[in-house]
Image (tube, rainbow, N blue to C red):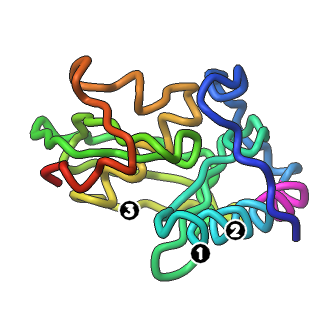
């Protein structure tokens, strides 16, 4: 499968609210998942980071996320709810602006419901890093980038200067 070009900060598709995946689109989504997998692995090889990627980042405007931490998890039509009142701050990075970190606030925990490639429904309770990750990726499906969630004007840092950050 081909490695797809990751759309970069400023590309209009990144600010688009994505359409839900329909069940009859699953055959096409399987190919997209393969492309997301290869693109994520390529990004990891180049930057040493990357746990998930959203379909709009490769120009596919569908509600699809591919996560691969310990094993691959395609996430179709995710819905986040049960967002905790407790928040935490972190330096976030993104494949669409690979040389920038941005300080954001995220919910400490939440629930995600989604479908898999067999159209089975799943539910996961998320905390900490996994909660943050899927909030970030779900934002992509709503046309929201982490730079829009920056805490303030001083919440940006170049990757080359990350050694100064308190993570």
- The residue where tag 1 is placed is 72
What type of secondary structure mainly makes up the magenta span?
Answer: helix
Answer above or below: position of 62 versus 119.
above
First reached walking from the N terminus: tag 2 or tag 3: 2
Image location (x, y in percent) of residue 33? 75, 62
Q: Quadrant of residue 67?
A: bottom right
Q: Single out the mark in the foreground, 2 or 3.
A: 2
Q: Are marks 1 and 3 in contact (CB under 8 Å)?
A: no
Q: Residue at x 22, y 19 (%)?
A: 152
Image location (x, y in percent) of residue 134? 42, 50
Q: Secondary structure at mark 1?
A: strand
Q: Single out the mark in the foreground, 1 or 3.
A: 1
Front in this rendered view, residue 102 or 128: 102
Query: How far is mark 1 from mark 2, CA to CA?
Result: 8 Å
Range of residues picked out in magenta: 26-32
- The residue where tag 3 is placed is 124
Callout 2: few (<14), some (14-19), or many (20+) C-alpha neighbours within 10 Å?
many
- The residue where tag 2 is placed is 37
Query: How far is mark 1 from mark 3, CA to CA?
Result: 15 Å
Q: Are marks 2 and 3 in contact (CB under 8 Å)?
A: no
Q: Is residue 29 magenta?
A: yes
Q: Quadrant of residue 7?
A: top right
Numbered circles on residues, count = 3
Q: Residue at x 33, y 60 (%)?
A: 130
Residue 3 showing in the rendered view: yes
First reached walking from the N terminus: tag 1 or tag 3: 1
Q: Secondary structure at mark 3?
A: strand
Describe residue 161's horizontal placement relative to residue 152 as left or right.
right
Callout 1: few (<14), some (14-19), or many (20+) C-alpha neighbours within 10 Å?
few
Q: Are marks 1 and 2 in contact (CB under 8 Å)?
A: yes
Image location (x, y in percent) of residue 105? 22, 35
Q: Quadrant of the N terminus?
A: bottom right
């Amino acid at each position: 499968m081909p490695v797809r070009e990751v759309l970069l900060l400023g590309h209009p598709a990144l600010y688009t609210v994505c359409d839900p995946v329909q069940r009859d689109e699953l055959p096409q989504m399987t190919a997209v998942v393969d492309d997301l997998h290869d693109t994520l692995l390529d990004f990891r090889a180049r930057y040493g980071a990357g746990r998930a990627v959203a379909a709009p980042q490769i120009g596919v405007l569908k509600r699809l996320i591919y996560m691969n931490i310990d094993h691959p998890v395609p996430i179709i039509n995710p819905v986040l709810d049960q967002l905790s009142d407790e928040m935490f701050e972190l330096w976030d990075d993104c494949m669409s602006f690979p040389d920038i970190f941005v300080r954001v606030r995220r919910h400490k925990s939440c629930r995600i419901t989604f479908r898999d490639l067999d159209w089975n429904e799943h539910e996961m309770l998320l905390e900490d890093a996994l909660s943050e990750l899927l909030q970030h990726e779900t934002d992509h499906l709503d046309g929201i980038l982490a730079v829009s969630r920056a805490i303030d004007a001083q919440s940006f840092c170049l990757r080359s200067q990350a050694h100064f950050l308190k993570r």
